[in-house]
Amino acid sequence: MLGQRRLIPSTSMLLAFDAATRNGSFTAAAQELNLTQGAISRQVSALENQLGVALFKRIKKSIKLTETGEVYAKEVSVALRTVRNASLNAMSDTQGKTLNLAILPTFGMRWLMPRFPDFLKKNPQVTVNFTSKLSAFDFNNENLHAAIHFGYPDWPDTEGTFLMSEEAVPVASPLLIGEHVTRKATELTNVPLLHLETRPNAWKEWFTQNNLAPPTDKGMVLEQFSMLTQAAVAGLGVAMLPHFLIQSELERGELEILIDLPLENSAGYYLMTPKSHVNYSPVNALKEWLTSQTLDEQ
């Protein structure tokens, strides 16, 4: 029993150690935690005594982590973040019905949000908090229960649920089409092409798929689908855009499909869930709802 207790230091020791690690001094750690420098020093010393290892090297008035201390600091930081997130969830939702969901910006705006009232109507007990991200989601460092991701379900320690594939086609403004004859794949090598930053090889893959050499001119690069869409509407070039994300522009005649040759893509949209939350009821409710929505459209 004594051995088990030794392996679980007090929270005050761990907080003092973590603050000293991040601030690089006992004095700064004391200011952060509203304690005295002596209190921080005593907590860290007590932690070292309990573990039986030196975590810091004391060099005059400065401190430096030992090799053991560096490894321990990283693991303690992750553990404290987990406890903070768990406490935040408990405080904000005593019923355990909060769902923190990361989404891709344009997918969220164009596809998910118009449909989401139906999810809330069917699951009124769930409070959903959204965050939009273009970069990869980090379940280890962010307080997320799930994420909607485009690509492949190959993240470690996660479960991926396939939602839908994507059919991207060459589109352009009628104004641009009036100036260029672009109804043949071979002619797209001579018109300005618009590129998405997160999918830099889309045009190259499309040309290769159609047995054509990609143009050497790189063309304009834009960060988000929404920016890419607006650039195409403004007649700045031809864009490779998913059909389901530009339905309204197609219906209004702001964009036209130039060539009905979709980009073949083995990637897709997935609901990614860390294994620690695969049995969390709001995640399961979202998974069931998303699956029903995508099946209805197939």
Image: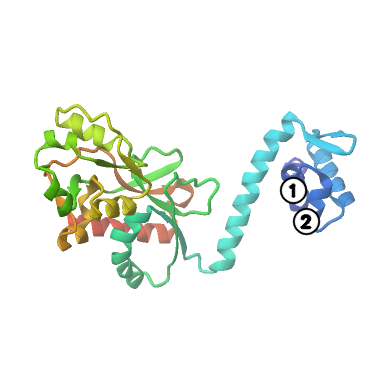
| Quadrant of the image containing the N terminus | top right
What's the residue at 65%, 50% (across, down)?
80
* Image-based side of 96 in relation to 47, left or right: left
Report the residue marked by disc 2: 33
Q: What is the spatial separation of the Cα atoms under label 2 and label 1, in whole angstroms?
A: 8 Å
What's the residue at 41%, 51% (across, down)?
147
For mark 2, give the secondary structure.
Answer: helix
Q: Quadrant of residue 69?
A: top right
Pick whichever of labels 2 and 1 is earlier in the sequence: 1
Picture coordinates of residue 294, whole percent (x, y): 24, 55
Q: Local crowd at mark 2 within 10 Å, few (<14), some, or many (≥20)?
A: few
What's the residue at 62%, 50% (across, down)?
81
Picture coordinates of residue 281, whole percent (x, y): 42, 60
| Amino acid bearing label 1 | Ala
| Amino acid bearing label 2 | Leu
Q: Is residue 289 something that shows in the picture?
A: no
What's the residue at 70%, 34% (across, down)?
70
Picture coordinates of residue 194, whole percent (x, y): 28, 43
Which residue is at the front of the view, 282 or 22?
22
Q: Quadrant of residue 67?
A: top right
Tell me if residue 236 comes above or below residue 117 in the rendering: above
Contact, CB < 8 Å: mark 2 with mark 1?
yes
